[in-house]
Amino acid sequence: MYRHLVDELSCRHTLCDADMRKLISNTDDCDVSYLMEKAREAAGKVYGKDIYIRGLIEISNYCRNNCYYCGIRRGNDRAERYRLTMAEIRECIDYGYQLGFRTFVLQGGEDAALTDDFLTEIIGAVKTQYDDCAITLSIGERTYDSYVRLYDAGADRYLLRHETADSGHYGKLHPADMSYENRIKCLMQLKEIGYQTGCGMMIGSPYQTVDNIIKDIRLIERLKPHMVGLGPFIPHKDTQFADYAEGSAALTLKIMSVIRIMQPDVLLPSTTALETIVGDAHKTGILAGCNVIMPNLSPEHAKEKYMLYNNKAVSGSEDASGLSVLRANMESIGYNIVTGRGDCKRPGVKGMLQDV
């Protein structure tokens, strides 16, 4: 019914709001399959059949924020807190490097102990020892000077999910001491500094509407991020949204395909949240246009405690045997695991941005 909209999106890389609403709301299986086919074509023109792997290291589950949906929020006194030492982080990176990882993602809550001194020492040490590696940071909102210092130390990429591009919706998901405006300011600063910058959102989050999702898509159009991390909303038992329904995997995959067609050169992970609610998410995500998989290299005790939502999946690909299985799974659908840095084909460029 709406194949012509998929063709228009593939040709123009955008749609008007009314047509985008029709495409997102469409549930016809044939149309959805066609959308995903076009997303694979778009990815293939830029990245071929290459799938990039990132070694995810969850360095701390302390967080100063109290986001209403998050299991490691400040107000969750049931969370078992931990913070990896510098030696533990280095050990994870050393092990990952031996396995073939050449990008490492340091992810954590907004922990005051993750100072610039601590992080620059880690980044500098890794870059000195492994100069063929990329470092991605995902540690939240910081000051402009902090972002500059981490970039100058050698950090290559920064992922800061915006979660929702509607300020009113943002206020329903976050306490008053957090602001949508500051989140967007941080994203603009990251691009200005020169990071390969990533944003992202939850699909099916509480109070979300199709119009909210369209606003997310428009933000991504204007920001032109190098990475987009999105996944279905999954509730956590110790939050006020504990009984809220999880987001739709089908809608998540549809939005992934739309983003891929709109921005063919973007780095698009098949995320852990998707894997948590879909049995074979890595294949499913790749077939929807994704080109990044992030096996978890964190120590076992950290994996158990870094619970943003209920029943978080662990990929099982964080050791040699797991990577062999992952490689075979990708080859079974015609794709290849690539162990290089896997940079976005559109490199970071310093400079001011238009308002987003």
Image (spheres, grey):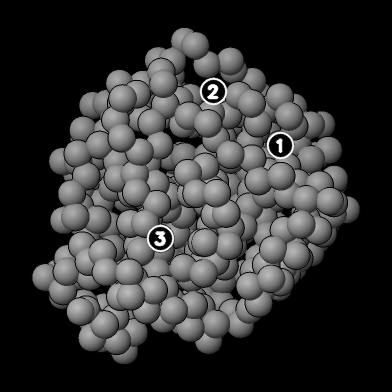
Where does residue 187 sit, x and y in percent of width and height? 39, 53
- In the picture, the disc for residue 62 is 2
Within-10-Å neighbours for mark 2: few <14, some 14–19, many 20+: many
Query: Going 25% across and 51% down the picture, which residue do you hit?
Result: 165
Please state which amino acid type lies under the numbered disc 2: Tyr
Front-lying residue, 135 or 216: 216
Q: Are marks 1 and 3 in contact (CB under 8 Å)?
A: no
75 w.r.t. 236: above or below: above
Q: CA distance from mark 2 to mark 1?
A: 15 Å
Drawn side of residue 286 relative to residue 230, left or right: right
- Residue 314 visible in the current orientation: yes
Give the residue drawn at x 44%, y 79%: 37
Q: Secondary structure at mark 1?
A: loop
Quarter of the picture containing the C terminus is bottom left
Report the residue that reaches farthest toward the left. 18
In this rendering, the label closer to the viewer, 2 or 3: 3
Give the spatial CA distance, label 2 vs label 3: 31 Å
Task: Give the secondary structure at mark 2.
Answer: loop
Where's residue 176, x and y in %? 23, 26
Question: The disc labelled 3 sits on which kind of residue?
Answer: Leu
**Circle 1 Cα neighbour tier, 10 Å, few/some/many (<14 / 14–19 / ≥20):** many
Amino acid carrying label 1: it is Ser
Query: In the rendered image, which residue does mark 1 sit on?
Result: 298
Q: Is residue 79 above or below residue 16?
A: above
